[in-house]
Amino acid sequence: MDLIVHPPQWVRFFFKYFLWKMPLVEGRKLMYITIDDGPIPELTPFTLDTLSEFGAKATFFCVGENVQRYPDIYQRIIAEGHSVGNHTFNHLKATRCKIEPYIENMHLADNYVKTNLFRPPHGILRNKKQSRMIHQEKTIVLWDVLSEDYNRRISPEECWQNVKRNASDGSIIVFHDNVKAEPRQKYALRQTLEYYSDLGYQFVPIPDGVNNF
């Protein structure tokens, strides 16, 4: 699972036009929390409250139909200074969808989530052709650290340890905004914020204008 939790350099090199980790900034210790799948009323307000408690900003990769259902929560994300990314309209898995419908679904989400950033659900794209088509329009953001909060087979503590073992300056860290992830996300997100804040890190959003072209 470490291949998924902390992708090695050979994987990053093979997919070098994906954004895996942010560049280091001299004189600052920065990390980039990302939150996938929301917004939803069951978890997003807690996530926003927790981030606010630590003065942290994140990047929310939003599912278009969730934004359509819960526009007030989405507006709160924007109002509190977080950035947003496109996570398709229906949380489509690329390997279960032909290239053109997948791109259309991404474009449908653009009507609700205005952003240059895109993260494919499950971190999967169908093939290089699809990747290149999206790459022409969006910055494809993957991760340096995957918490695995969605994995019911691990404990909240194991989820936190996934982060602690692998995060470093510039890391893009993935948590999830869905009911399945809730017990692990609530624990590991707070642990991450407390631990790295004490070490002098700041949590900032991925700028919408960033690109890896």
Image: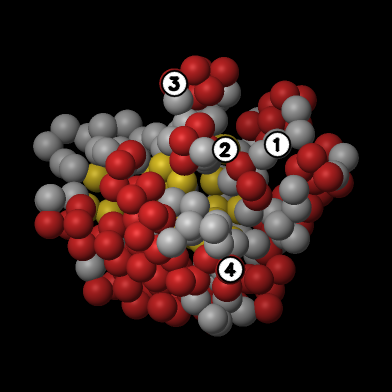
Q: Residues within 10 Å of mark 3 (few under 14, many from 20)?
A: few
Tell me if label 3 and label 4 are in contact, CB under 8 Å.
no
Residue bearing mark 1 = 125
Circle 3: residue type? Gln
Mark 4 or mark 1, earlier in chain = 1
Circle 1: residue type? Leu
Q: Residue at x 58, y 68 (%)?
A: 180
Above or below: residue 137 compared with residue 155: above
In the image, 9 versus 40, the foreground residue is 9
- Distance (Cα) linking label 4 and label 2: 25 Å
In the rendered image, which quarter is residue 169 located in?
top left
Q: Residues within 10 Å of mark 4 (few under 14, many from 20)?
A: few
Q: Nearer the viewer, mark 3 or mark 2?
A: 3
- Distance (Cα) linking label 2 and label 1: 10 Å
**Residue 123 percent location from the top left of the image:** 61, 42
Residue bearing mark 2 = 140
Mark 3 or mark 4, earlier in chain = 3
Q: Residue at x 44, y 79 (%)?
A: 45
In the image, 88 versus 121, the foreground residue is 121
Q: Name the secondary structure under disc 4.
A: helix
**Residue 29 percent location from the top left of the image:** 18, 43
In the image, which disc is placed on residue 194? none
Above or below: residue 102 compared with residue 187: above
